[in-house]
């Protein structure tokens, strides 16, 4: 039931993004036939808009705020033990990150995947990668170009809490977005 709800929410978000990107309208100016030699179209990509965002929408480190507030968007997303699924509370924050990244194509994000100390080093690196990729997949499905996103897994190597109890392990099972 829970996964069906998340899947429905993600599908609805994707439909809204696709619908917003579609335009309908008719061409108002006539197309004139070209006279003379055919020119090869310029295939160089348009320049990336690196116009800095207003200082009111980001902090001194470039992290975005909730729109219209002075509260930063959450950049850390926590996971259940041995899981890489995003929670429903994370989806709204990630949608705001996606909107910010679509509006600021010059910004880049590194998504770090982390685990608690349980499990082998190799398993934790793979699980950290799955966690980082779950955030990346959501952002890409929300319209963020993959070229703005980079993922890295640290496994258990960079704990947020050095404790050896469930409360510490819960803080270490995470994905963190770092703006560049």
Image (cartoon, rainbow, N blue to C red):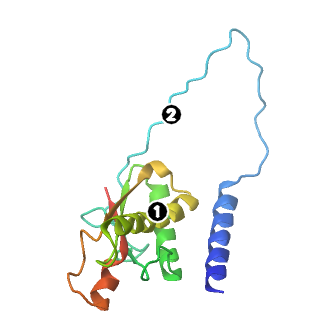
Residue closest to the far left? 162
Q: Position of residue 164 (x, y in %)?
A: 23, 87
Q: In the rendered view of the protein, which quadrant contains the C terminus?
A: bottom left
Q: Position of residue 115 (x, y in %)?
A: 34, 74
Of badges 1 and 2, the one in the foreground is 1
User: At 49% from the left edge and 35% from the top edge, which residue is drawn?
Assistant: 46
User: At 43% from the left edge and 78% from the top edge, which residue is drawn?
Assistant: 82
Q: In the rendered view of the protein, which quadrant contains the N terminus?
A: bottom right
- Would residue 47 be found to the left or right of residue 165 on screen? right
* Residue indicated by mark 2: 45
The quarter of the picture where residue 37 lies is: top right
Q: Mark 2, residues whose alpha carbon is within 10 Å: few (<14), some, or many (≥20)? A: few
Q: Earlier in the sequence, mark 1 or mark 2?
A: 2
User: At 61% from the left edge and 78% from the top edge, which residue is drawn?
Assistant: 6
> Does residue 67 appear in this view?
yes
Residue closest to the far front? 120
User: At 77% from the left edge and 40% from the top edge, which residue is drawn?
Assistant: 27
Above or below, 87 relative to 47: below
Q: Mark 1, residues whose alpha carbon is within 10 Å: few (<14), some, or many (≥20)? A: many
Q: CA distance from mark 1 to mark 2?
A: 27 Å
Frontmost residue, 167 versus 45: 167
Q: Position of residue 160 (x, y in %)?
A: 25, 77
Cβ atoms at labels 1 and 2 below 8 Å apart: no
* Residue indicated by mark 1: 133
> Does residue 113 appear in this view?
no
Q: Which mark is residue 14?
A: none
Above or below, 22 relative to 78: above
Frontmost residue, 71 versus 34: 71
Q: Secondary structure at mark 1?
A: helix
Q: Secondary structure at mark 2?
A: loop
């Amino acid at each position: 039931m829970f996964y069906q709800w998340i899947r429905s929410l993600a599908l609805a978000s994707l439909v809204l993004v696709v619908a917003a990107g579609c335009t309908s309208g008719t061409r108002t100016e006539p197309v004139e036939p070209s006279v003379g030699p055919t020119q090869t179209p310029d295939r160089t990509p348009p320049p990336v808009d690196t116009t800095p965002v207003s200082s009111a929408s980001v902090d001194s480190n470039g992290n975005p705020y909730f729109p219209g507030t002075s509260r930063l968007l959450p950049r850390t997303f926590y996971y259940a033990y041995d899981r890489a699924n995003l929670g429903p509370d994370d989806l709204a924050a990630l949608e705001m990150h996606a909107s910010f990244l679509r509006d600021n194509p010059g910004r880049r994000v590194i998504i770090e995947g982390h685990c608690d100390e349980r499990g082998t080093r190799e398993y934790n690196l793979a699980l950290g990668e799955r966690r980082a990729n779950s955030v990346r997949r959501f952002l890409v499905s929300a319209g963020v170009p993959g070229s703005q996103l980079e993922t890295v897994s640290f496994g258990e190597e960079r704990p947020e809490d050095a404790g050896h109890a469930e409360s510490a392990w819960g803080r270490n099972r995470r994905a963190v977005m770092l703006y560049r």
